[in-house]
Image: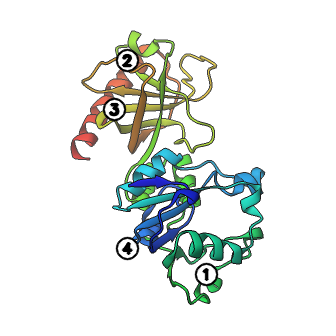
């Protein structure tokens, strides 16, 4: 998949899907279906127009790009969203971006899509333009739940990663650089790769999870480690089963499969170790079937 800026696009007709697409969930995938080009924005528009309301995102631009590429799209066009772009009128967006630059023959959006200055543009304005076909995709529901990025963010924050995965169409993922810890896990017999969560992105709620770390089965703790009172803030600690490698300085991807339990303090360290052994057994059983 080619990733490009608006000013660098080649001259050709396009079937375009337009949206923020945070998480690239199953509703987004329906919007993208049949499109050869995806148009998205970076950063999230709310970070510019209403910073106080900007959400923590499900995906970084890197992760979003990989997910979109997996859908067989030919081209991803990323528009830098800044104050100047935010003040562009809806008609200017249609005329200059969709028609002149991208030569749209079909535009696919969700039915709640808004665009242009003060979000004044809507799907009816797109439908009124005869220069391209407009495809409007209704909100998708799964087992009575509306599929939306905001709902999935709430599920992940609550630790409900299984429900989130059903709406995403794949496990919730996070990635980050492995940093040195206090080596407490190694002392207990469970050496971990440690990631400090990116504050701009959603992090699963505190607890212990079965996950995959770059494809390998892993038991992951998210939280503040109340047993030892380290005071380091939230840390994500991944114990990769059956593999002890030096990951310091490398980027690790975690795919969260199931929440095993909440994070808590134990009466003794030996009780904690026994629970960790049980977590590993549980994780192995889950990963074997995932």
Q: Is residue 162 visible?
A: no
Measured in 3D between alpha carbons, the distance from the residue under mark 3 to the one under mark 4, in whole angstroms, is 36 Å
Q: Nearer the viewer, mark 4 or mark 2?
A: 4
Measured in 3D between alpha carbons, the distance from the residue under mark 2 to the one under mark 1, in whole angstroms, is 52 Å
In this view, the residue in front, 12 or 177, is 12
Picture residue at 46% right of the left edge, 46% below the top:
63
Q: Give the farthest residue toward the front.
A: 11
Position in image of residue 121 (x %, y %) = 69, 77
Does the CB distance between marks 4 and 2 fall below 8 Å? Answer: no
Measured in 3D between alpha carbons, the distance from the residue under mark 3 to the one under mark 1, in whole angstroms, is 44 Å
What is the number of the mark on residue 123?
Answer: 1
The residue identified by callout 3 is 218
Measured in 3D between alpha carbons, the distance from the residue under mark 3 to the one under mark 2, in whole angstroms, is 11 Å
In this view, the residue in front, 283 or 71, is 71
The residue identified by callout 4 is 34
The residue identified by callout 2 is 191
Picture residue at 48% right of the left edge, 28% below the top:
177
């Amino acid at each position: 998949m080619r990733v490009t800026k608006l000013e660098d696009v080649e001259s050709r007709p396009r079937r375009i899907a337009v949206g923020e697409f945070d998480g690239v969930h199953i509703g987004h995938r329906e919007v993208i279906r049949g499109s050869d080009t995806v148009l998205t924005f970076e950063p999230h528009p709310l970070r510019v127009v209403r910073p106080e309301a900007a959400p923590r995102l499900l995906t970084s631009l890197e992760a979003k790009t990989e997910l979109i590429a997996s859908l067989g799209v030919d081209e991803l066009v990323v528009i830098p969203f800044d104050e100047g772009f935010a003040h562009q009128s809806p008609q200017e967006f249609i005329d200059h971006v969709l028609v002149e630059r991208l030569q749209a023959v079909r535009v696919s959006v969700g039915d709640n899509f808004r665009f242009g200055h003060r979000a004044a543009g809507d799907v009816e304005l797109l439908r009124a333009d005869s220069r391209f076909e407009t495809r409007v995709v209704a909100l998708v529901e799964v087992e009575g739940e509306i599929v939306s990025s905001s709902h999935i963010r709430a599920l992940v924050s609550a630790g409900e990663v299984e429900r989130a995965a059903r709406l995403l169409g794949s496990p919730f993922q996070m990635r980050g650089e492995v940093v040195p810890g206090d080596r407490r896990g190694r002392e207990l017999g469970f050496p971990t790769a440690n990631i400090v969560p990116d504050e701009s992105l959603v992090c699963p709620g505190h607890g212990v999870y079965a996950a995959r770390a770059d494809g390998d089965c892993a038991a992951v703790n998210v939280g503040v480690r109340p047993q030892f009172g380290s005071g380091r803030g939230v840390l994500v600690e991944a114990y990769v089963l059956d593999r002890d490698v030096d990951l310091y300085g490398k980027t690790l991807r975690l795919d969260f499969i199931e929440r095993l339990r909440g994070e808590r303090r134990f009466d003794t360290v030996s009780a904690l170790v026994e629970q960790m052994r049980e977590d590993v057994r549980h994780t192995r059983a889950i990963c074997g079937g995932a």
